[in-house]
Image: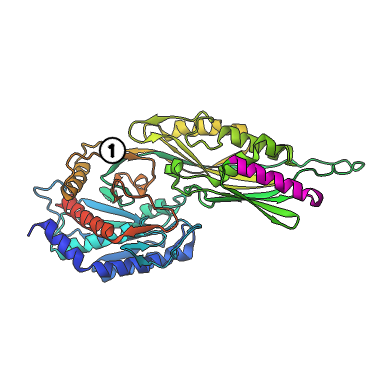
């Protein structure tokens, strides 16, 4: 029996056990940045690793490692040098569940051959898949030349605060793959800048001998939308204050303008207040063009001349709304900001307004910006800061990562490509570039390898995120073959 046939048979034999393990993992609400949930999921995963016969360590609650091999390192006739460590990098933190779920986001429900839950494809499903791939290789009796080390991160979905500290406490693998992107293999990733703009509005001082001007139209008490920078916001709302005597006329006019706009907006009346709700379509920020940004949609609507005429705004509120519509608007590629650029492998720079908080006193706007792999972080930071100076706001870089690129001719790259080609029979496939940011960037020598197959729907960060059971099994088989190929 070939190794591939043996691995397939072994993995099928523990399929039910693997599904139950994934269900238990999905039940833990491990939102990125929330200590209790991420600690719980780490302990669950490490204990699972121990139960499967591996050594597993909690590294000061920064993350963990699960290891296999390392005792047979002669490396003769091997592509690996003696003692080489091959890493598998996963993360167990997840983005917020958001709106619009039909299935419970933290229940691990199985229906129609799919297992649903936040993290099912990003990245708990692939993490379970890779762990059971290690089990399949161990159970086969294969002895790796070197060590296989799974590294478990807890902050991939936010700014990477814990991961650098984790890597100070453990040696980095010689080469790693990250099951958190697409097949066949990603050798180039865009760089990332998370930018926050903050501005405190100047308040007009009314002389003591003057009374405030009577209000006309309506005021914006506050605008709130978005929760995570790396998600296209699906909802944003403006709380409006409308004078009682003008309410009927203002609401009629607003509803008329909404119907003419073509936007997914709704006006909901309550007493002297009303809520203008904006509904978008979520997507991952690196594919922001595939979503519909509820924050941008709302601001572009408010910036329309007919709406601005009805708005009782401070000068600074008006300036921000107008400038946003002019410089960002509904664009995805930074054209009006003067940031547009692209390369052949990773494509165009993208700009995603991820969240907005604004009232009459201040505003905070968060943006996810991805730049092509051909560009370098240092020069892009200067361009980005310059492009946003027109907002006259305090700029804070919440996080930044340089781009990543490998040569397709590199030995480990060729081995992973061989595994995918042999498994699928698609001998002509080539390595890819992507706008996504994976944990590969946190390591000196790492690339993204799966788990999504070409043509598969993008469900990460979406309502009703899922992984098909057959997809999970196929990934487990591929990762088992990859472990053998990289450590033979």
What color scheme is it? rainbow
Seen as rendered, the residue at the extreme right is 209
- 14 relative position to 212: left or right: left
Q: Depth check: 398 or 482 in front?
A: 482
What percent of the width, then of the height, locates residue 280? 52, 48
Seen in the picture, residue 399 relative to 269 is either above or below; the reply is: above
What percent of the width, then of the height, locates residue 384? 51, 33
**For residue 249: magenta?**
yes
Assign the magenta stretch its main secondary structure: helix
Disc 1 residue crowd, few under 14, some 14–19, many 20+, Cα 10 Å: some
Snapshot quadrant of residue 411: top left
Seen in the picture, residue 223 relative to 374 is either above or below; the reply is: below
- 378 relative position to 278: left or right: left
What percent of the width, then of the height, locates residue 86? 24, 52
Residue at 63% of width from left, 38% of height from top?
A: 393
What percent of the width, then of the height, locates residue 166? 38, 55
Q: Which residues are magenta?
A: 243-261
Mark yes or no: residue 170 visible: no
Mark yes or no: residue 129 visible: yes
Residue at 37% of width from left, 52% of height from top?
A: 168
Q: Depth check: 378 or 413 in front?
A: 413
Judging by the rendered image, the residue that carries numbered circle 1 is: 406
Residue at 32% of width from left, 44% of height from top?
A: 444
Snapshot quadrant of residue 148: bottom left
């Amino acid at each position: 029996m070939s190794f591939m046939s043996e691995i397939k048979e072994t993995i099928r034999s523990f399929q039910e056990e693997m599904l139950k393990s994934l269900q238990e993992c999905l039940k833990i609400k491990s939102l990125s940045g929330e200590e209790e949930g991420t600690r719980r999921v780490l302990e669950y995963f490490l204990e699972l690793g121990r139960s499967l016969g591996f050594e597993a360590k909690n590294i000061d609650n920064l993350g963990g490692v699960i290891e296999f091999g390392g005792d047979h390192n002669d490396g003769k006739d091997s592509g690996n040098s003696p003692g080489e460590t091959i890493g598998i990098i996963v993360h167990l933190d997840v983005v917020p569940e958001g709106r619009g779920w039909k299935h419970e986001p933290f229940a691990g429900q199985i229906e129609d051959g799919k297992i649903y839950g936040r993290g099912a494809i990003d990245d708990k499903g692939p993490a379970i898949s890779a762990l059971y791939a290690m089990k399949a290789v161990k159970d086969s009796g294969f002895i790796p030349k070197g060590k296989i080390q799974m590294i478990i991160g807890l902050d991939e979905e936010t700014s990477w605060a814990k991961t650098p500290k984790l890597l100070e406490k453990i040696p980095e693998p010689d080469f790693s793959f990250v099951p958190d992107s697409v097949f066949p293999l990603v050798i180039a990733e865009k760089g990332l800048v998370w930018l926050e703009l903050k501005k405190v509005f100047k308040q007009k001082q009314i002389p003591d001998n003057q009374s405030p001007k009577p209000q006309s139209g309506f005021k914006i008490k506050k605008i709130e939308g978005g929760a995570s920078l790396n998600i296209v916001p699906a909802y944003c709302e403006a709380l409006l204050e409308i004078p009682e005597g003008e309410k009927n006329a203002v609401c009629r006019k607003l509803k008329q303008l909404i119907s003419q706009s073509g936007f997914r907006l709704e006006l909901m009346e309550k007493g002297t207040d009303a809520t203008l709700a904006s509904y978008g379509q979520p997507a991952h920020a690196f594919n922001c063009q595939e979503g519909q940004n509820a924050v941008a949609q709302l601001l572009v609507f408010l910036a329309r001349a007919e709406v601005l005429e009805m708005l009782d705004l401070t000068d600074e509120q008006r300036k921000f709304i107008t400038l946003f519509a002019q410089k960002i608007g509904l664009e995805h590629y930074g054209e009006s900001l003067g940031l547009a650029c692209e390369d052949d492998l990773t494509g165009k720079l993208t700009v995603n307004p991820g969240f907005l908080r604004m009232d009459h006193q201040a505003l905070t706007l968060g943006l996810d910006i991805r730049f092509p792999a051909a560009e370098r972080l240092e020069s892009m930071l200067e361009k980005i800061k310059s492009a946003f100076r027109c907002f006259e706001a305090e700029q804070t870089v919440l996080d930044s990562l340089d781009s990543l690129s490998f040569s397709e001719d590199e030995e480990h790259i060729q081995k992973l490509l061989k595994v995918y080609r042999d498994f699928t029979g698609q001998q002509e496939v080539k390595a890819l570039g992507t706008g996504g940011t994976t944990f590969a960037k946190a390591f000196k020598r790492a690339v993204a390898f799966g788990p999504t197959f070409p043509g598969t729907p993008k469900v990460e960060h979406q309502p009703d995120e899922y992984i098909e059971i057959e997809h999970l099994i196929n990934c487990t088989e591929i990762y088992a073959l990859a472990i053998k190929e990289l450590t033979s």
